[in-house]
Image (spheres, grey):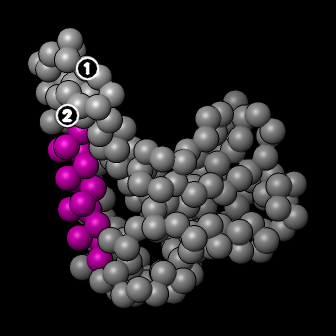
């Protein structure tokens, strides 16, 4: 099955704090992950599995990089989907955040600190094991996502997400991200878990 790139062109020039140039560059990177995922999956169908081993083999290397391209594709979709300022946290999500962090402000401070301590992703999840909201660090696209989690917010903290507009000022980018976070999308993700 080929993975198709979603159209996020409506975001270009529409996000306060992220320029059209920044979003266009980021969308180009996302398109590269979609293309690479399709390429890897096609090659996996044709590659000899008999040479698979830990140290090296064509199949082995493709399998090791498959999760990078897959998560690179779908984390970016979660990220772009949760951009575009809209709404506020729902009462249900606010209650879950309060239970987990004490307050919305404490949650946002934790998410910002999480984003500032990684060169990768800061992911807010609902943890199916303890029923709480968590913020996790992901190094690269395939390292650090714990099991039993449902993503609520994807915050791309890689430099490609902000360098054009903020240089090395990651904190300014995270502040801008909070202003354009689409809470309606986040509320919908949380509500779907409760069905």
Magenta range is 22-37
Given residues 87 and 50, the one toward you in this image is: 50
Q: Is residue 184 visible?
A: no
Q: Position of 9 compared to 148: left or right? A: left
Q: Position of 178 compared to 38: left or right? A: right
What residue is shown at x 77% (from left), y 74% (from top)?
A: 105
- Where is residue 188? Give x, y as percent: 60, 47
Badge 2: residue crowd in 10 Å (few <14, some 14–19, many ≥20): some
Given residues 36 and 78, the one toward you in this image is: 36
Q: Secondary structure at mark 1?
A: loop
Residue corresponding to mark 2: 40
Q: Is residue 102 above or below residue 66?
A: below
Q: Is residue 6 above or below residue 183?
A: above
Point out the image quarter for the C terminus.
Answer: top right
Q: Earlier in the sequence, mark 1 or mark 2?
A: 2
Point out the image quarter for the N terminus.
Answer: top left
Quadrant of the rendered structure where residue 194 is? top right
Badge 1: residue crowd in 10 Å (few <14, some 14–19, many ≥20): some
**Residue at the extreme front of the image, as rendered:** 55
Residue 52: mark: 1
Is residue 28 within the magenta segment?
yes
């Amino acid at each position: 099955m080929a993975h198709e790139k979603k159209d996020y062109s409506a975001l270009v020039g529409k996000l306060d704090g992220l320029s059209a140039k920044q979003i266009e560059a980021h969308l180009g990177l996302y398109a590269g992950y979609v293309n690479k995922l399709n390429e890897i999956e096609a090659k996996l169908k044709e590659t000899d599995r008999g040479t698979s081993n830990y140290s090296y083999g064509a199949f082995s290397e493709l399998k090791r990089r498959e999760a990078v391209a897959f998560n690179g594709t779908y984390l970016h979709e979660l990220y772009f989907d949760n951009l575009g300022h809209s709404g506020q946290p729902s009462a249900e999500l606010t209650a879950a955040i309060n239970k987990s962090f004490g307050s919305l402000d404490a949650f946002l401070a934790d998410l910002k600190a999480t984003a500032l301590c990684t060169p990768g992703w800061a992911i807010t999840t609902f943890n199916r094991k303890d029923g709480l909201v968590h913020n996790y660090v992901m190094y690269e696209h395939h390292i650090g996502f714990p099991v039993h989690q449902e993503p609520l917010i994807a915050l791309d903290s890689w430099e490609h997400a902000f360098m054009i507009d903020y240089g090395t000022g990651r904190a300014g980018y995270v502040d801008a991200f909070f202003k354009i976070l689409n809470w309606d999308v986040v509320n919908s993700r949380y509500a779907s878990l409760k069905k």
